[in-house]
Image (cartoon, rainbow, N blue to C red):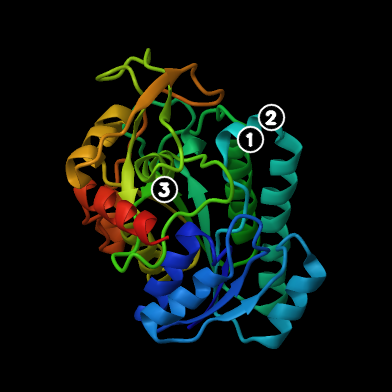
């Protein structure tokens, strides 16, 4: 199939491009490069020895997107393009609501116009709000604790309604947890512009000496050691989950958690990184971050049952691969 990947030069998007190409699909990438670099796609080509078509466009631009669709016979879409920093969404909500929701609307409308029937959406576990763990797809969604999560929940509702109104349109809503790690080649990984918002690139930059110490946001949560607990999943496992969802997609809306089903605290991850790479990570505890909750991890049994997908890589692999990329980067 010919697959359009929006945000395809980003962290998760680029790894998914590799998984798509290795599975025999053709890939077209649309990305405005606001939080990624074009050179990532050169590495994707080097890893796979396959070509990727690239368009530098903003997915909120309906005219530019229409031009892209008119030039290619697209079979399916995987939609990653969007802002993703929880903390920033709290301080700049209008930026998040406009970009994340408008891009979904414009892309879905283009799919309807050009008869594209497969749509895989990059959602998030944040749509569950402060629910009881583990998070299960059948839960009633609670109000999320930040605008980023709200944009994901709203986009899910938009796509669900479009699928109801358009028989034959197939949507997979992938609620995934905390991607970490990098491709085993060390050629691509998480390389945010500016100060990292996610834990692992912060840890690797401290390990490399680019940052003095890690900031741990709160140590008074009701968790094993007081720090926040998350379900960390290797980005390659996550990428393969997108391909499994695409290949098994049928009419209607289908929701899947993509996670390991295990919770790991911030300090447990730090200790795992230190042990895996024999590097000490200095840290300081600071105030809690607005919008964060104490603990979340997945019940991922539905994806295993219906998609024949399961996360395979362990925490040590995540830490080693992340550090390998940072050293080469």
Q: Nearer the viewer, mark 3 or mark 2?
A: 2
Give the CA distance from mark 3 to mark 2: 23 Å
Give the CA distance from mark 1 to mark 2: 5 Å
Q: Nearer the viewer, mark 3 or mark 1?
A: 1
- The percent coordinates of residue 123 (x first, y second) are 51, 49
**Placement of 125 over or under 145, stated as above or below:** below
Looking at the image, how many numbered discs can be counted on the residues?
A: 3
87 left or right, relative to 139: right
Q: Are marks 1 and 2 in contact (CB under 8 Å)?
A: yes
- The percent coordinates of residue 225 (x first, y second) are 27, 18
Q: Which residue is mark 1?
A: 88
Q: Residues within 10 Å of mark 2 (few under 14, many from 20)?
A: few
* SS at mark 2 in the image: helix
Quick one: label 3 or label 2, which is nearer the N terminus?
2
Examine the image and state in which quarter residue 186 appears: bottom left
Q: Is residue 263 visible?
A: no
Q: Which residue is mark 3?
A: 176
Examine the image and state in which quarter residue 220 appears: top left
Q: Residue furthest right?
A: 63
Q: Is residue 125 visible?
A: yes
* SS at mark 3 in the image: strand
Q: Quadrant of the C terminus?
A: bottom left
């Amino acid at each position: 199939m010919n697959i359009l990947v929006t945000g395809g030069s980003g962290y998760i998007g680029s790894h998914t491009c590799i998984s798509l190409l290795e599975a025999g699909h053709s890939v077209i990438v649309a990305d405005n490069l606001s939080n990624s670099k074009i050179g990532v796609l050169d590495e994707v080509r080097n890893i796979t020895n396959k070509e990727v078509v690239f368009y530098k466009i903003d997915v909120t631009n309906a005219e530019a997107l229409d031009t892209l669709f008119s030039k290619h016979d697209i079979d399916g879409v995987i939609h990653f393009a969007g802002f993703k920093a929880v903390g920033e969404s709290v301080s700049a909500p209008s930026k998040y609501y406009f970009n994340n929701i408008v891009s979904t609307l414009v892309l879905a409308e283009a799919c309807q116009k050009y008869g594209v029937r497969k749509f895989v959406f990059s959602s998030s576990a944040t749509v569950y709000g402060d629910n009881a763990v583990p998070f299960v797809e059948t839960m009633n969604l609670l109000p999320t604790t930040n605008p980023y999560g709200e944009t994901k929940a709203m986009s899910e509702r938009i796509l669900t309604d479009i699928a109801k109104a358009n028989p034959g349109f197939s949507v997979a809503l992938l609620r995934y947890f905390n991607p970490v790690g990098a491709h085993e080649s060390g050629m691509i990984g998480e390389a945010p512009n500016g100060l990292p918002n996610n834990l692992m690139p912060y840890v690797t930059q401290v390990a490399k000496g680019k940052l003095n110490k890690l900031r741990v946001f709160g140590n008074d949560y009701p968790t094993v050691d007081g720090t926040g607990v998350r379900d960390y999943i290797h980005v390659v496992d996550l990428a393969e989950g997108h391909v499994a969802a695409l290949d098994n997609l049928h009419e209607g809306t289908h929701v899947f958690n993509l996670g390991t089903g295990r919770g790991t605290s911030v300090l447990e991850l730090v200790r795992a990184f230190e042990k895996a790479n024999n590097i000490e990570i200095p840290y300081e505890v600071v105030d809690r971050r607005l919008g964060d909750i104490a603990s979340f991890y997945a019940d991922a049994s539905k994806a295993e049952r219906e998609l024949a997908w399961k996360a395979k890589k362990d925490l040590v692999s995540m830490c080693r691969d992340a550090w390998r990329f940072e050293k080469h980067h």
